[in-house]
Image (cartoon, rainbow, N blue to C red):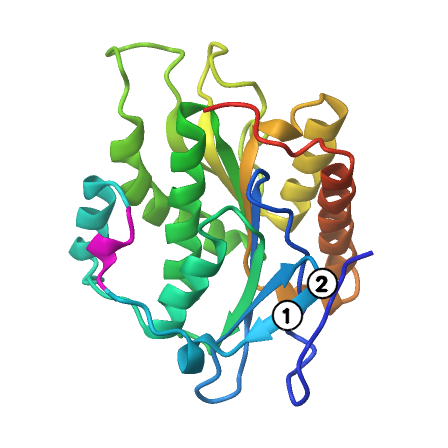
Amino acid sequence: PMETSRPAGRTSEESAAASTGPLRPINLLTSRCDHPGASTSFKRDDTGLVSSALAMRHRPASLRVEDLGLPPSVVERFGERGVKTTYAWQRGAIDSASDGSNLVFCAPTSGGKSLVAEVLLVKALMRRGRQGRALFVLPFHSLVNEKAKDLEKILAPMYRKRTPGDGRSPVAVRAFAGETEGAPLARPLGCPGQNEIVAVTTIEKASVTISRLAEEGRLGELCAVVVDELHLVGEQGRGGILESMLAKLRFADRRGALRETGG
Protein backbone atom coordinates (compact mmCIF):
# COMPACT_ATOMS: atom_id res chain seq x y z
CA PRO A 1 0.00 0.00 0.00
CA MET A 2 2.93 2.38 0.38
CA GLU A 3 4.49 4.01 -2.62
CA THR A 4 8.22 3.44 -2.58
CA SER A 5 11.20 4.19 -4.70
CA ARG A 6 14.94 3.99 -4.38
CA PRO A 7 17.79 5.02 -6.64
CA ALA A 8 20.16 2.41 -8.02
CA GLY A 9 22.73 1.36 -5.46
CA ARG A 10 20.63 2.34 -2.44
CA THR A 11 19.54 -0.05 0.27
CA SER A 12 16.04 -1.31 0.97
CA GLU A 13 15.98 0.96 4.01
CA GLU A 14 15.13 3.86 1.74
CA SER A 15 11.35 3.44 1.77
CA ALA A 16 9.28 6.52 1.01
CA ALA A 17 5.81 7.88 1.55
CA ALA A 18 3.96 10.09 -0.89
CA SER A 19 3.54 13.84 -0.56
CA THR A 20 0.12 15.13 0.36
CA GLY A 21 0.56 18.75 -0.70
CA PRO A 22 0.85 22.01 1.21
CA LEU A 23 -2.56 21.90 2.91
CA ARG A 24 -2.15 18.57 4.64
CA PRO A 25 -0.04 17.26 7.51
CA ILE A 26 3.60 16.41 7.20
CA ASN A 27 4.32 12.72 7.59
CA LEU A 28 8.03 13.02 8.21
CA LEU A 29 9.78 9.68 7.89
CA THR A 30 13.41 9.07 8.73
CA SER A 31 15.64 6.10 8.18
CA ARG A 32 19.23 5.10 8.75
CA CYS A 33 21.53 4.88 5.74
CA ASP A 34 24.93 3.31 6.19
CA HIS A 35 26.52 4.53 2.98
CA PRO A 36 29.44 6.81 3.98
CA GLY A 37 28.60 10.42 3.28
CA ALA A 38 25.14 9.62 1.96
CA SER A 39 22.42 12.11 2.84
CA THR A 40 19.41 11.80 0.59
CA SER A 41 15.99 13.38 0.74
CA PHE A 42 12.93 12.08 -1.09
CA LYS A 43 9.95 14.19 -2.06
CA ARG A 44 7.06 13.36 -4.32
CA ASP A 45 5.68 15.78 -6.88
CA ASP A 46 2.76 15.39 -9.30
CA THR A 47 4.78 13.11 -11.54
CA GLY A 48 5.82 10.66 -8.82
CA LEU A 49 8.55 10.15 -6.28
CA VAL A 50 11.80 11.86 -7.07
CA SER A 51 15.08 11.95 -5.18
CA SER A 52 17.90 14.43 -4.96
CA ALA A 53 21.27 14.28 -3.27
CA LEU A 54 20.75 17.47 -1.33
CA ALA A 55 24.25 17.61 0.06
CA MET A 56 25.46 17.83 -3.54
CA ARG A 57 22.79 19.98 -5.19
CA HIS A 58 21.20 22.22 -2.56
CA ARG A 59 23.03 25.47 -1.91
CA PRO A 60 20.94 27.50 0.55
CA ALA A 61 21.67 31.16 1.16
CA SER A 62 22.20 30.54 4.87
CA LEU A 63 22.90 27.54 7.06
CA ARG A 64 22.24 29.36 10.33
CA VAL A 65 19.48 27.98 12.53
CA GLU A 66 18.34 31.52 13.30
CA ASP A 67 17.49 31.92 9.59
CA LEU A 68 15.10 28.94 9.49
CA GLY A 69 12.08 31.01 10.50
CA LEU A 70 11.71 29.46 13.95
CA PRO A 71 10.51 31.20 17.11
CA PRO A 72 13.37 32.89 19.00
CA SER A 73 12.78 30.63 22.00
CA VAL A 74 13.27 27.54 19.84
CA VAL A 75 16.43 28.96 18.26
CA GLU A 76 17.70 29.63 21.77
CA ARG A 77 17.03 26.03 22.84
CA PHE A 78 18.91 24.68 19.83
CA GLY A 79 21.76 27.03 20.65
CA GLU A 80 21.92 25.67 24.19
CA ARG A 81 22.51 22.26 22.61
CA GLY A 82 25.33 23.73 20.56
CA VAL A 83 23.33 23.66 17.33
CA LYS A 84 23.68 27.00 15.57
CA THR A 85 24.12 25.91 11.97
CA THR A 86 22.92 23.09 9.73
CA TYR A 87 24.64 21.05 7.08
CA ALA A 88 23.67 21.83 3.50
CA TRP A 89 21.73 18.56 3.18
CA GLN A 90 19.81 19.30 6.39
CA ARG A 91 18.80 22.72 5.14
CA GLY A 92 17.85 21.17 1.82
CA ALA A 93 15.63 18.59 3.51
CA ILE A 94 14.02 21.29 5.65
CA ASP A 95 13.34 23.48 2.63
CA SER A 96 11.85 20.50 0.76
CA ALA A 97 9.09 20.04 3.34
CA SER A 98 8.64 23.52 4.79
CA ASP A 99 5.47 23.93 2.69
CA GLY A 100 3.82 20.99 4.46
CA SER A 101 4.78 18.31 1.95
CA ASN A 102 5.68 14.84 3.09
CA LEU A 103 9.35 13.96 3.30
CA VAL A 104 11.31 10.78 3.76
CA PHE A 105 15.05 10.96 4.15
CA CYS A 106 17.99 8.92 5.31
CA ALA A 107 21.41 9.68 6.74
CA PRO A 108 24.16 7.70 8.45
CA THR A 109 23.90 6.97 12.17
CA SER A 110 24.40 10.23 14.13
CA GLY A 111 24.24 12.07 10.82
CA GLY A 112 21.78 14.73 11.93
CA LYS A 113 18.33 13.30 11.16
CA SER A 114 16.86 14.45 14.48
CA LEU A 115 17.48 18.14 13.80
CA VAL A 116 15.60 17.96 10.49
CA ALA A 117 12.67 16.18 12.14
CA GLU A 118 12.50 18.62 15.05
CA VAL A 119 12.69 21.73 12.86
CA LEU A 120 9.95 20.51 10.54
CA LEU A 121 7.82 19.49 13.52
CA VAL A 122 8.09 23.02 14.93
CA LYS A 123 7.23 24.50 11.54
CA ALA A 124 4.15 22.28 11.21
CA LEU A 125 2.94 23.31 14.66
CA MET A 126 3.55 26.97 13.85
CA ARG A 127 1.39 26.75 10.73
CA ARG A 128 -1.54 25.36 12.72
CA GLY A 129 -1.25 27.79 15.61
CA ARG A 130 -2.56 26.41 18.90
CA GLN A 131 -4.82 23.86 17.22
CA GLY A 132 -2.19 21.53 15.77
CA ARG A 133 -1.03 18.29 17.33
CA ALA A 134 1.51 15.67 16.36
CA LEU A 135 2.72 12.13 16.84
CA PHE A 136 6.41 11.31 17.17
CA VAL A 137 6.87 7.58 16.63
CA LEU A 138 9.94 5.70 17.87
CA PRO A 139 10.69 1.98 17.76
CA PHE A 140 11.78 1.34 21.35
CA HIS A 141 10.48 2.19 24.82
CA SER A 142 13.94 3.32 25.91
CA LEU A 143 13.96 6.05 23.27
CA VAL A 144 10.50 7.44 23.98
CA ASN A 145 11.20 9.09 27.34
CA GLU A 146 14.53 10.46 26.15
CA LYS A 147 12.99 12.03 23.04
CA ALA A 148 10.08 13.42 25.04
CA LYS A 149 12.49 15.23 27.37
CA ASP A 150 14.39 16.69 24.43
CA LEU A 151 11.21 17.89 22.71
CA GLU A 152 9.85 19.31 25.96
CA LYS A 153 12.86 21.63 26.23
CA ILE A 154 12.35 22.81 22.67
CA LEU A 155 8.56 23.18 22.59
CA ALA A 156 7.60 24.17 26.15
CA PRO A 157 8.18 27.92 25.61
CA MET A 158 5.72 27.82 22.69
CA TYR A 159 2.94 26.51 24.94
CA ARG A 160 3.22 28.34 28.23
CA LYS A 161 -0.04 28.27 30.17
CA ARG A 162 -2.12 31.35 29.50
CA THR A 163 -3.54 31.31 33.03
CA PRO A 164 -1.75 29.70 35.99
CA GLY A 165 -3.69 26.65 37.12
CA ASP A 166 -5.77 26.58 33.95
CA GLY A 167 -6.70 22.91 33.54
CA ARG A 168 -7.54 23.43 29.88
CA SER A 169 -4.11 24.67 28.82
CA PRO A 170 -2.20 21.91 27.03
CA VAL A 171 1.21 20.54 27.91
CA ALA A 172 3.77 20.58 25.13
CA VAL A 173 4.91 16.95 25.18
CA ARG A 174 4.01 13.66 26.85
CA ALA A 175 5.66 10.26 26.56
CA PHE A 176 3.62 7.09 26.09
CA ALA A 177 5.44 3.79 26.35
CA GLY A 178 4.99 0.53 28.22
CA GLU A 179 2.56 0.93 31.11
CA THR A 180 2.17 4.71 30.79
CA GLU A 181 -1.21 5.78 32.09
CA GLY A 182 -3.63 7.11 29.52
CA ALA A 183 -3.65 7.10 25.74
CA PRO A 184 -1.92 9.45 23.30
CA LEU A 185 -4.09 12.39 22.19
CA ALA A 186 -6.96 10.95 24.20
CA ARG A 187 -9.10 14.12 24.23
CA PRO A 188 -9.48 17.08 21.89
CA LEU A 189 -7.65 20.24 22.88
CA GLY A 190 -9.71 22.44 25.17
CA CYS A 191 -11.19 19.54 27.13
CA PRO A 192 -10.46 19.39 30.87
CA GLY A 193 -7.43 17.35 31.82
CA GLN A 194 -3.83 17.08 30.73
CA ASN A 195 -3.92 17.30 26.94
CA GLU A 196 -0.61 17.13 25.12
CA ILE A 197 0.34 18.83 21.88
CA VAL A 198 2.93 16.24 20.87
CA ALA A 199 2.63 12.60 21.89
CA VAL A 200 5.88 10.64 21.76
CA THR A 201 5.14 6.96 21.54
CA THR A 202 6.06 3.53 20.25
CA ILE A 203 4.94 2.00 16.97
CA GLU A 204 2.25 -0.10 18.63
CA LYS A 205 0.68 2.76 20.59
CA ALA A 206 0.88 5.05 17.57
CA SER A 207 -0.99 2.53 15.45
CA VAL A 208 -3.77 2.25 18.02
CA THR A 209 -3.90 6.04 18.26
CA ILE A 210 -4.29 6.50 14.50
CA SER A 211 -7.11 3.95 14.43
CA ARG A 212 -8.88 5.64 17.33
CA LEU A 213 -8.55 9.13 15.87
CA ALA A 214 -9.94 7.83 12.58
CA GLU A 215 -12.94 6.25 14.32
CA GLU A 216 -13.60 9.47 16.24
CA GLY A 217 -13.21 11.68 13.17
CA ARG A 218 -10.26 13.49 14.72
CA LEU A 219 -7.43 12.80 12.28
CA GLY A 220 -7.68 16.43 11.22
CA GLU A 221 -6.12 17.42 14.55
CA LEU A 222 -2.78 16.07 13.34
CA CYS A 223 -0.44 18.48 11.60
CA ALA A 224 2.58 16.17 11.68
CA VAL A 225 3.45 12.50 12.09
CA VAL A 226 7.16 11.80 12.53
CA VAL A 227 8.32 8.21 12.13
CA ASP A 228 11.89 7.41 13.12
CA GLU A 229 13.72 4.32 11.81
CA LEU A 230 11.35 3.86 8.89
CA HIS A 231 13.33 0.90 7.58
CA LEU A 232 11.70 -1.20 10.31
CA VAL A 233 8.69 -1.37 8.00
CA GLY A 234 10.47 -4.31 6.39
CA GLU A 235 10.70 -6.36 9.59
CA GLN A 236 8.38 -9.22 10.41
CA GLY A 237 5.76 -8.48 13.05
CA ARG A 238 6.29 -4.86 13.98
CA GLY A 239 6.95 -3.90 10.39
CA GLY A 240 3.41 -4.90 9.51
CA ILE A 241 2.03 -2.72 12.29
CA LEU A 242 4.01 0.26 11.05
CA GLU A 243 2.98 -0.32 7.44
CA SER A 244 -0.66 -0.65 8.46
CA MET A 245 -0.52 2.65 10.35
CA LEU A 246 1.02 4.46 7.39
CA ALA A 247 -1.47 2.90 5.00
CA LYS A 248 -4.34 4.20 7.15
CA LEU A 249 -2.89 7.70 6.97
CA ARG A 250 -2.53 7.44 3.20
CA PHE A 251 -6.11 6.21 2.84
CA ALA A 252 -7.42 8.97 5.12
CA ASP A 253 -5.48 11.54 3.12
CA ARG A 254 -7.07 10.40 -0.12
CA ARG A 255 -10.49 10.78 1.47
CA GLY A 256 -9.61 14.31 2.60
CA ALA A 257 -9.61 13.50 6.31
CA LEU A 258 -6.19 15.07 6.86
CA ARG A 259 -6.92 18.56 5.64
CA GLU A 260 -5.89 21.24 8.07
CA THR A 261 -8.91 22.55 9.90
CA GLY A 262 -7.54 25.13 12.27
CA GLY A 263 -5.05 27.93 12.81
**Disc 1 residue type (three-letter):** Val
Point out residue 187 in the picture as x, y percentages from the top left corner: 57, 19
Check contact, mark 2 vs mark 1: CB within 8 A. Answer: yes
Can you tell which quarter of the image residue 42 is in?
bottom right
* Residue bearing the label numbered 2: 47
* Residue at the spot 79% in from the left edge and 57% down from the top edge: 240
Q: Quadrant of residue 208?
A: top right
User: Is 63 inside the magenta-drawn segment?
Assistant: no
Kindly tell me whether residue 37 is visible in this rendering: yes
7 vs 240, left or right, is left
Which element carries disc 2, helix, strand or loop? loop
Q: Which residues are magenta?
A: 64-69
* Vertical comparison of 189 with 196: above or below: above
As drawn, is 79 to the left or to the right of 136? left
Q: Position of residue 243 (x, y in %)?
A: 75, 55
Say if the magenta span includes residue 66. yes
**Residue 97 drawn at (x, y percent):** 49, 54
Q: Which mark is residue 50?
A: 1
In the rendered view, would you say 36 is above or below 241? below
The quarter in which the C terminus is drawn is top left
Q: Residues within 10 Å of mark 1 (few under 14, many from 20)?
A: some
Three-letter residue code for mark 2: Thr
Q: Which mark is residue 154?
A: none
Residue lying at 49% horizontally and 18% vertically, measured from the top left: 189
- Give residue 234's position: percent from left, percent from top: 74, 68
Residue at horizontal 46%, vertical 14%?
193
